[in-house]
Structure formats: C-alpha cells, structure tokens
Image (tube, helix red, strand yellow):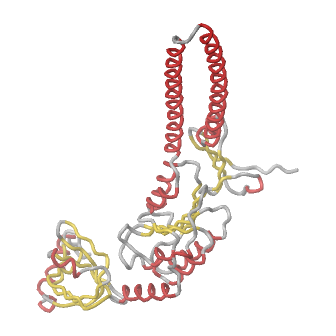
Amino acid sequence: MKQAISVTKFNNYIKQIFDSEELLHNISIVGEVFGVSISRNVIYFSLKDDTSSLACVCFYPNLINQLQEGNKVIITGSPNYYTKAGKLNFNVNQVEKTGQGELYENFLKLKQKLEEEGLFDNNKKKPFPKEIKRIGVITSREGAVIQDIKNVTWRRNPSIDIVLYNTKVQGNLADKEIAKGIEIMGKYDKIDVIVVARGGGSLEDLSAYNTELVARAAFDCPKFLVSAVGHETDYTIIDFVSDFRAPTPSAAAEILTKDLNQTKFNFNIVINNLIKAYSNFIKNKKNILRTNSSKLLTLTDKNILTAQAKLINNSNLFVNTFERFLNCKYYDLGLNEVKLNKNNPVEILNRGFAKIEQNKESIKSIKNIDFNKELSIIFKDGNITAKPIKKEK
C-alpha cells in the first residue's frame, strides 16, 4: 500500500510546480470581464471566453475602471496557487481594454432592436392596479428572494396572497422557464400583479433576463408586470419592457402593498381632527353667546325678554341640529371602524375562524380541494395540517 501524504504537502507540491514554470510568469490572456467585486482595495473578477472562465485577483484598485462588467480586456500577470484553500487564482498587474465583450454587445444590440420595435414605449405600459389582493412571483423557491418578498408583504399587509411560480434564475434554459412562467401567470384571472424577481449578479448571471424570449413574453403579458431583477444598479432588458421597474425584490413588495398600520394611523388622525374641530366650534359659539349676552344688558326689559327668548330658541335649535350632526358622524365613524375590523385578518382569526390553504392557495369551496393532498389550517396562534376525507353520498 502506498504511503499517503498530507493535504498541505500536496498543495505545496502543486504550488512549486506553478512557481517554477517560467513560461507561466508574466503572461497575457484575453477575455471578457464578469463577476466584478472589490473588498479592502482588492479587485476580484473572472475572465471568460466561449467555453471557459478564470478566477482573477488584482491588488491595484486604480485599475477598477478598466475592469467593468462586460469589457473585453487583455490582462497580464501570473498564476498563483493558494495552498491554504487549494485554489488557483491569476494575479493581475496590468489591464488593457480592447473593447466591449460579446455578452454586453449582444445586450446593446437586442436593446436597440426592441426599442425600435416599440417594446419600451411608455404609452403601451399598463396602469398601476387600484387594488392588489394576490401577487404572482416568478423566481426560484430555493433563493432568499421569495422569502424577502413574503416577509415585507406580510409585515405590511398579512391579508395579501402570494403565488409562486418556481423557475431557474440563471443557467441553461432559465429564460424559457421564466417566459413560460410569465405566460401562465398572465392567464391566471385571480392574480392582480406579476413580479419577476431575482437577486443581483454579474451580466452573465442575469443573462436569462436579457433574452428576446423573456422580453416578448413580458410585453405580451396581459397583467401588470413588475421587474425586480438584481440590485438598484443592475439593468436588464426586462426592466425596459416591464410596466414598472423596482430597484430590488424587497422594494417591489413594499411598493405593491398598503401598510394596514398606516391606514389605521390615518383613520385616527381623521377622528382627532374631527374632535379638535368640534372643540373649536363649541368654543367659538360660546364666545358668540358671551358677546350677545353682554349686548342684552343694554337693552330695555322688553327687548331683553324678546331677545332672550329668541336666543334660547336659537340656542336650542343649534344644540339639537349639532347633536344630530354629531350622531351622524359618530355613526359613520362606527361603521368605518367595524368595516376595518371585519377586514382585518387577525380579528377574523381571533373570532374563531380559520384560514384553509392547499398548495399555498386559499380554499373557498369544497370543489377546489384536492383530496389527495393535505390541507393547511391557519389559526390565530398557529397552523395544523389535516387530511381531507371525501364523504360519499
């Protein structure tokens, strides 16, 4: 049996091979830049061609302007094998820009083509929905994006439903899955708005959202469509075609939901303003009564009796009229408060009702139940699952 060597010894052996090979020192490589990031004045990026990529490190932060996403460059440097992690990087000391990379050039060509065809025309974009009860999200179920959208949406308004269409967000055939998701969601009558979302990434990572297939699917979608792809600085073709571009997925969730706490706060402001207006009204009328009372003292006894009777009559008429006015307003306020409480999903659950879901969708009729799958029953203080049993007639 051969004697085994340690990982450290093996990695040191590999490093010695790279360090001793003179032909690998100070060589030049041409390719397209992608995945650029900078940390503590060190630039990390990758260089790619049609079939391969190379991880690169540059310790010269002043070269960042030449290492922009999509640039085609010639880099000069040497390979370095990092023994501690067993990883090969190419250390760059010179960069020469030779033009735009093929991926970025294709992006610009497609953008120009679709713009000339009118797919970016603001006059063809659909208006923002007046009421949103259900949001369709097209993204991966595995990523953090769908969780961010759920957290923001349900924190602001727990009554909104979220329907997920699971797709790839990058890689082979991702654009076909995204386009299919837009087509299917667009035909679903109960969805009020569609959000196409994913996190940030390089131009290559976001390439699925820069295809003509996805662009035309978004343009043909009959629903209001929001693009929430990447970070605020990332722009993709679907951003220009969509009815609205959100800078991030979380921002999309916030823009599309109304904050119930804010609604209640505004309602309390209206009540307080009404109470304040009533107090000012009463105070003003008291001042008028005091002024009129002073004038009465200068009148003759006959005039005093006449004016006093008229004043009492007017005062009673005013009081009766204003009481009716206040009663009507308090009645209206009570109705509005009852409506708000009835529509509050938390209050509904507190009254002993429960929400039944299956496959993340609300069940409103026994006709919608799939008796082969479990039901999720949501109470005010927790959830349970139950197996539906179909009672034979």
Apparent side of residue 75 relative to residue 339 in the rendered image (left or right): left
The residue at 79%/51% (across/down) is 390
Could you say where residue 93 lies in the image, as x and y percent from the top left?
Answer: 14, 82
Could you say where residue 335 lies in the image, as x and y percent from the top left?
Answer: 66, 36
Above or below — where is 30 with respect to 60? below
Q: Residue furthest right?
A: 393
Apparent side of residue 333 relative to residue 69 in the rendered image (left or right): right
Q: Nearer the viewer, residue 79 or 308?
A: 308
Q: Nearer the viewer, residue 194 or 13?
A: 194
Q: Nearer the viewer, residue 79 or 166?
A: 166
Identify the image quadrant of the N terminus: bottom left
Residue 33 position by quadrant: bottom left
The residue at 36%/85% (across/down) is 104
The residue at 28%/90% (across/down) is 99
Q: Nearer the viewer, residue 4 or 198?
A: 198
Above or below — where is 377 with respect to 136? above
Could you say where residue 79 lies in the image, as x and y percent from the top left?
Answer: 18, 82
Above or below — where is 338 with respect to 171? above
